[in-house]
Image: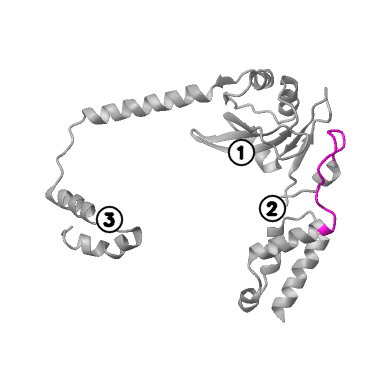
Amino acid sequence: MEACLLMRRIYEMAAELRTVDPRKIVETCFGDASPEALRLTPDKEHIYRAIRKIKHEKGFDVEEPKSLANINIGKLELLETIDGEKMFFADTGVIEGTRSLIFTTPSLLKVLAQAKGIACDATCNSSVQHFSQHYVIHAFIKEHVAVPVVFCQMSSKTERAYIEVLRRLPDCPQLTFFLSDFEQAEINAFTWNFPNAQLLRFSESLHSEIAMIRQTVAEIDLMPQPLPSDKEIRLAQLLNQYGYLSTVEYFDRIGEIFSEIDF
């Protein structure tokens, strides 16, 4: 009985809270349910699909636009993350026949504002009608770690289109570089919007990393290497001897292998 009431509550919430992420609805309802009720409910993926179906039937789905001018921004503004943050950030409107929709959250914008570096990437296989690319901006949070923070649907790849996206982003006072190997139009837009940041190209950065690795390897090769011990030689022989085994068989017999060597 409790499991049935739990599922009823989930579906009622899905119908009422049409802008809330399915995962958040399930998390809320499962929070005070008993272990026995949870055991009797369908798996979460099944529930997620059911919630999405209810949302579709209630008419929340954002329809494919018939033109750039005919986009239901009102529905996009209702979108929220599982943490309750607004996802839709800005609409450039139709400018010179182009339009871009920008998605991000307040938390991600704070990360971007503190970034010392930015990297950009795009796929030109946008699944949204009338838009030519899905454009993503990544913020470096550490020296070699970047996270995606801004997601855009862009109908054009002109310099003006990129400028209209970038000028809506927050100031990045600590920004020292942006990483790109994209069109010159994008590079020009970044230079215009972040005049104090240096352009680094992906290819140049990759070549630098490769050169550093090669130098490190060369230095290691010049260092005197200790000869392997008898135990290490025997272990290598045993591993080679059992190399024909499958992964499961190997782990079943790993005790047998190491029993021959007294570590």
Sequence-first disc among 3 and 1:
1
Q: Residue at x 69, y 53 (%)?
A: 83
Check contact, mark 1 vs mark 2: CB within 8 A: no
Which span of residues is magenta-colored?
57-71
Q: Is residue 187 above or below residue 170?
A: above
Q: On residue 148, which mark appears?
A: 1
Q: Residue at x 79, y 54 (%)?
A: 19
Q: Is residue 67 above or below residue 96?
A: below
Do the CB atoms of the residues marked 3 and 2 lie less than 8 Å apart? no
- Dot 1, crowdedness within 10 Å: few (<14), some or many (≥20)? some
Quadrant of residue 208 within the rendered picture? top left
User: Where residue 125 sits in the image (x, y, percent)?
Assistant: 66, 35
Quadrant (top left, top right, bottom left, bottom right) of the C terminus: bottom left
Magenta stretch encompasses residue 62: yes
The residue where tag 3 is placed is: 244
Is 174 situated left or right of 79 in this image?
left
Q: Quadrant of the N terminus?
A: bottom right
Q: Which badge, 1 or 2, is on the more N-terminal residue? A: 2
55 and 142: which is toward the camera: 55
Would residue 189 be visible to someone looking at this image? yes
**Label 3 sits on what residue type?**
Tyr
Q: Which mark is residue 135?
A: none
At label 1, which amino acid type do we have? Pro
* Mark toward the viewer: 1 or 2: 1
* Circle 3 SS class: loop
**Can you identify the residue that label 2 sits on?**
83
